[in-house]
Amino acid sequence: TETRRLAPKTIANMQSHMRASLAPLAARPIDTIRKSDVAHRMAQLSDTPYAANRALATLSTLFSFAEQRDLTPPNSNPAKGVRRYPERHRERMLTADEVAALWSALIDLQAELKHRIAAPAIMLGMLTGWRVGEVRTLRWDAVDMVAHEATISGKTGPRRAPVPRSTHRLLHYLL
């Protein structure tokens, strides 16, 4: 069976879950882990339900990979059927004071050579609402300063987005 390739960030996240949440299971031979072990570990992680769910997804992915590679018998994934914790959509906006403090900190950081690009990039994201990857991959040939638009590429593919006048100086600095 063909396995899909995982993005480097996904792999890093999975490794983090293995270290932080799944260490007791990761230390054991793969063929000794049972569904009851996984359920027990999930119960131990009840105080961090979101992290527990991500860890369970990681474990399930790893066992599916092991099955595809014939390292474990078919349909032996002990993470399948283990109940996940309910998740609620979380959204929190910064207060005006928090925005001001963050902006001030970014201005201070920009003065440091190692942050001279990162700080303005974060500022650009704050002013536009663009995702980190959209800011990071922005190119001059995708920006139309006259029409105040840019074609940005991100996780959902390319799209047109407004370029507020307040961002023009930052764009000139970054690009």
Image (cartoon, grey):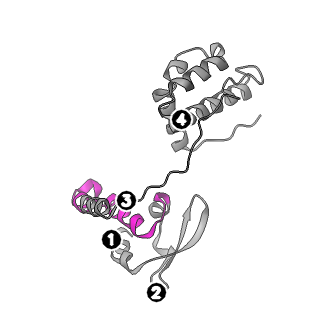
Mark 4, residue position: 14
Between residue 162 and residue 43, name the one nearer to us. Answer: 43
Labels 3 and 1: the sequence-earlier one:
3
- CA distance for labels 2 and 3: 31 Å
| For residue 50, above or below residue 166 | above
- CA distance for labels 3 and 1: 26 Å
Q: In the rendered structure, which amino acid carries the disc numbered 2? A: Val
Secondary structure of the residue carrying tag 3 is loop
Q: Decide: marks 2, 4 in contact (CB < 8 A)?
A: no
- CA distance for labels 3 and 4: 29 Å
- In percent of the image, x 48 and y 60: which residue is there? 131
Residue 130 x, y percent position in the rendering = 48, 65
In the image, which is nearer the foreground, mark 2 or mark 4? 4
Label ID, residue 94:
3
Label ID, residue 173:
1
User: What segment carries the magenta color?
Assistant: 107-133
Secondary structure of the residue carrying tag 1 is helix
